[in-house]
Amino acid sequence: MTLRSRSLRKFVNLVALICASVSALIGIFFLVWILWEITGKGISSVNWEFFSELPTPPGEPGGGLANAIVGSIIITLLAMVLGVPIGILAGTYLSEFGHGRFADLIRFITNTFVSAPSIVVGVFVYSIMVVPMKSFSGLAGGVSLGIIMLPVITRTTEEILRLVPVGLREAALALGTPYWKMVVSIVYRAAKTGMITGVILAVARVSGETAPLLFTALNSPYWPSGLTEPMANLTVTIFNYAMSPYEDWQAKAWGGAFLITAAILAINILSRLFAQRGSKK
Amino acid sequence: MLKNRGRTPELLFQFLTRFSGSFILILLCAMLISLTWEAWPSIQKFGIGFLFSTEWDPVRGNFGALTTIVGTVLSTAIAMIIAVPLAIGVAIFLTELAPFSLRPIFGTAIELLAAIPSIIYGMWGLFSLAPILADHVQPWITEHFGFIPLFDGPPMGVGMFTAGLVLSIMILPFMASVIRDCFLMAPQVLKESAYGLGATTWEVVKDVVIPYSKRGVIGGLFLGLGRALGETMAVTFVIGNAHELSISLFDPANTIASTLANEFTEASDPLYLSALIELGLVLFMITFIILGLAEWWLNKSSPGGKSR
């Protein structure tokens, strides 16, 4: 190898590494910029009234997004009630009984569904629930988020259950434990931390969803009054307010954006800490 | 008798898990059937021509999907052109360059950023990025590259170009974290032996890490592609929503998802609604095929095949 080729290689190496570092810098720059803007523009709108009062018409001072916050929580809880049990059982099926071709098909569809466009789920729930019930509803919103949550939980559950050592299962089975009891009291218990983390991350993911709620829960300026009526929620409110021409509404949209970003980042960080602590035990 | 009592919960448990597993298949079929059913009036009226017509006239009841399909494909293409090299660069930085003590922090930061909801990217795009593009970037580009029809247009800040840019920033952390995971799977021994032979860092990445993780990386890029195709809120804010085909990237346009988000609740006429649902069906098919290909590709690539 001649000296020239060596310096050329070093030069190419330098250029490539600079390019990689620059792309990392570009990425970090944009993402810091986004968080900066959200915090800078949003934090001033977040005060006590923001959490406790109903929205006011544009131009009227004061008011908050309390109904939307409550509505978002209700819709997310509904989604959990629907998505978590089925997701965990489906994940159990794939990890414990899923060997054949049928299971491969289910696994394939689940993995594909994880990234399927959420707006299409909204259209689907619109046609199976909103049209027959003749009303947008918080229930439909919960169902659409539940459907989006389902494959995420199925996948994480399967991955985590597979990590439970075979020896542990065999030991329980050798003692004469029925298979279902072995899964429930040994495998689930061993994988508990991971499963909870998976559920929390799935909840964090759907709580930022907007598109499917546009045609299911819609929105409302009132307190949530029943599951069969349109229900206020944070993300659709952010969308409507941000697109409105009124400055005070836009300010509230930034407040909502800040709140939801902070909540999702906090949930993510906490669940990671929780998972770390669990794995050290 | 005793034996039977033991069997019942066993069978019940198996049935429950199997049913839940099948549920997602049922869901997929239900989605295809119900979307087709609701879109039927439009499918019947416009036939295959729906996919090739640029007309979108709710007043006269004429609907075609071409502008939205082109918009979806074009905005995704712009996003991929920008985001793919950046994501690979970020992944190289994270796996080879960042100081060891900082790697977990950078890695977690990237994963956290991938979790930020898309509506946030949309708001930022509309209120922070678009004015800067309109005032500084677009006029400059038009002045210097305006002879290319792609860059000749009114500097409004919103439009196809901005949508592609915002999309690229949204999928960047997602793709970077997937690619990083793939890069990390390259065996340390191989890398060390390459270094031992005197290879530079770039040569190790180019000749060892990338070939080893190629399939996973391509699968990850496809996942990013699928995400960009179906993305709604980040695009709806900044694309400008116009049902027109335009050669200029600075003109407002639309995508399937943004059209649904904007017009769905306004569609009073049954045919209008049906056409919108058909758009949803088209989007579902496109993304499902792309994501399915990605999944098939990843399955083929993982050692040991099916069980990932």
Image: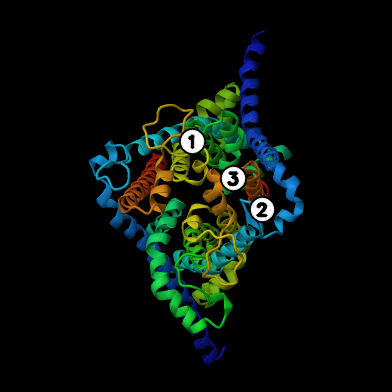
Nearest the eye: A13 or A141: A141
Q: Mark 1 — residue?
A: A191
Tell me whether circle 3 and circle 2 mark residues in contact (CB < 8 Å).
Answer: no
Tell me whether circle 1 and circle 2 mark residues in contact (CB < 8 Å).
Answer: no
Residue furthest front as drawn: B60
B171 left or right of A60 in image:
right
Q: Residue at x 64, y 16 (%)?
A: B8
Q: Mark 2 — residue?
A: B63
Report the disc number at residue A120: 3
Q: Quadrant of residue A151?
A: top right
Tell me which amino acid carries mark 3.
Val
Depicted A212 relative to depicted B234: above or below: above
Residue B304 visible in the displayed image: no
Nearest the eye: B136 or B20: B136
- Marks 1 and 2 sit apart, C-alpha to C-alpha, by 52 Å
Q: Quadrant of residue B105?
A: bottom left
Nearest the eye: B130 or B297: B130
Q: Position of residue B68 (x, y in %)?
A: 61, 58
Q: Residue at x 43, y 26 (%)?
A: A226
Chain under disc 3: A
Q: Nearer the viewer, mark 1 or mark 2?
A: 2
Tell me which amino acid carries mark 1.
Ala
Q: Could you say whether the residue bearing mark 3 is in a helix, strand or loop?
A: helix
* Badge 3 density bin: few <14, some 14–19, many ≥20, Cα 10 Å: many
- Marks 3 and 2 sit apart, C-alpha to C-alpha, by 19 Å
Nearest the eye: A152 or A61: A61
Q: Position of residue B135 (x, y in %)?
A: 39, 73
